[in-house]
Image (cartoon, helix red, strand yellow):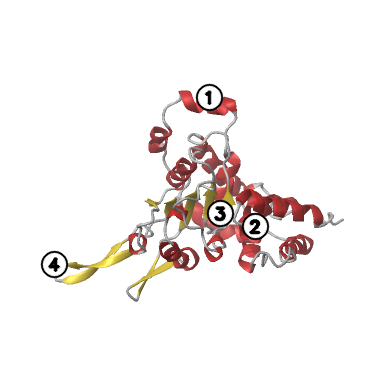
């Protein structure tokens, strides 16, 4: 396995997005991890922290088609999936694809749409297909939904159902920049201008290769046991939560493989699992990002880490 290709892939994405989003290399790397694993990302943070710009920069960096949808209460499922219309010139019905027919879809303020519209994303996110008027259409690959929401503003919003939250591979929060970083952003050109200048930093064949080859990263029995101990601990929290689903366990396993490959290793270590657990599992336990991470952190302190084998 050419591990250096994984590292170059990660560095190219982080370097390109770093021109737009200052000081958020870790968040960019996590988005890249989800992208390689064919997962979806939920960005939850205050307004003005760069959520939309991060996703636009990432889309330009990896290439492919990009669509942005502003979610509002009057948004309909057909506004996402597309619809059949009657072409008077041809005298027949034709299908007009919606924004989901893109490689990367930005669902801005996803919790402002009604549950009916939110549910239209479920089939697309999980099965990579949509069904309109009984006709099923396959979506392009790679396909990534990156959604944003404001965790503090609840007026006029519709909380995401657990079934949809579980379909997000990981949840991130960018947080504030340092004073020095913010000063550099204030005095420079607008982020929009910088994004427009970005060109793809990775080729489609490179993306196809890393998405295929990361599965060869080895996970030893002790490390797998450690991962499952964490998953089972979430299911023993009490009747207020059902714990992490099998989908969540698979997401943590695959994310650890990609993280190891990005670090230049062909094997996963317990630290990979421990680092990713709050991001991959937190939103599957609680509606609040901070609360979910705290629950996972407490579990990580209780679960014994396997020792290195001689």
Q: Which badge, 2 or 4, comes first in the chain's sequence?
A: 4
Which one is in front, 158 or 246? 158
Horizontal side of residue 136 vs 262, given as left or right? left
Which residue is pictured at 74% across the width and 50% down the height? 271
State yes or no: discs 2 and 3 in contact (Cβ < 8 Å). no
Q: Sequence order check: which comes first, mark 4 or mark 1?
A: 4
Q: Position of residue 306 (x, y in %)?
A: 82, 57
Find residue 34 and name its label. Answer: 3
According to the picture, the residue beneath numbered tag 2 turns out to be 281
CA gap, disc 3 and disc 4: 43 Å
Q: Earlier in the sequence, mark 3 or mark 4?
A: 3
What SS does tag 2 mark?
A: helix
Query: 10 Å neighbourhood of mark 4: few (<14), some, or many (≥20)?
Result: few
Q: Is residue 145 above or below residue 89?
A: above
Tag 2: Cα neighbours inside 10 Å, few (<14), some, or many (≥20)?
many
Q: Is residue 265 visible?
A: yes
Image coordinates for residue 123, horizontal then vertical, percent: 45, 68
Residue for badge 1: 183
Give the label, 3 or 4, closer to the camera. 4
Label disc, if present, on residue 88 of the rendered structure: 4
Residue at the spot x=18%, y=72% of the render?
Answer: 92
Residue 1 visible somewhere in the drawing: no
Distance from Cα at disc 2 to Cα at disc 4: 51 Å
Q: Residue at x 52, y 43 (%)?
A: 13
Earlier sequence position, callout 2 versus callout 3: 3
Q: Nearer the viewer, residue 249 or 261?
A: 249
């Amino acid at each position: 396995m050419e591990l250096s290709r994984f590292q170059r892939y990660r560095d190219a994405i982080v370097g390109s997005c770093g021109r737009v989003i200052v000081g958020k290399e870790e968040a960019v790397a996590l988005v890249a991890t989800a992208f390689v694993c064919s997962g979806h990302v939920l960005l939850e943070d205050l307004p003005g922290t760069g959520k939309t710009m991060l996703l636009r920069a990432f889309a330009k960096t990896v290439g492919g088609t990009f669509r942005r949808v502003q979610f509002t209460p009057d948004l309909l499922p057909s506004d996402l999936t597309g619809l059949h219309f009657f072409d008077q010139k041809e005298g027949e019905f034709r299908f007009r694809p919606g924004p989901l027919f893109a490689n990367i879809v930005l669902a801005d303020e996803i919790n402002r749409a009604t549950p009916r519209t939110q549910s239209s994303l479920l089939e697309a996110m999980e099965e990579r297909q949509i069904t309109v008027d009984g006709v099923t259409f396959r979506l392009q690959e790679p396909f990534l939904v990156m959604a944003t929401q404001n965790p503090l503003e609840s007026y006029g919003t519709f909380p995401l159902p657990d079934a949809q939250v579980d379909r997000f591979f990981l949840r991130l929060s960018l947080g504030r920049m340092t004073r020095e970083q913010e000063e550099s952003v204030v005095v420079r050109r607008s982020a929009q201008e910088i994004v427009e200048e970005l060109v793809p930093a990775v080729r489609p064949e490179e993306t196809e290769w890393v998405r295929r080859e990361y599965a060869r990263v080895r996970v030893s029995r002790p490390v797998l046991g450690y991962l499952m101990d964490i998953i089972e601990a979430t299911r023993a929290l009490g009747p207020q939560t059902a714990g992490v689903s099998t989908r969540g366990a698979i997401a943590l396993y695959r994310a650890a493989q990609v993280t190891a490959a990005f670090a230049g290793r062909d094997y996963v270590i317990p630290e990979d699992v421990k680092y990713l657990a709050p991001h991959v599992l937190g939103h599957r336990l609680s509606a609040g990002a901070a609360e979910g991470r705290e629950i996972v952190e407490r579990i990580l302190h209780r679960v014994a880490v396997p020792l290195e084998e001689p």
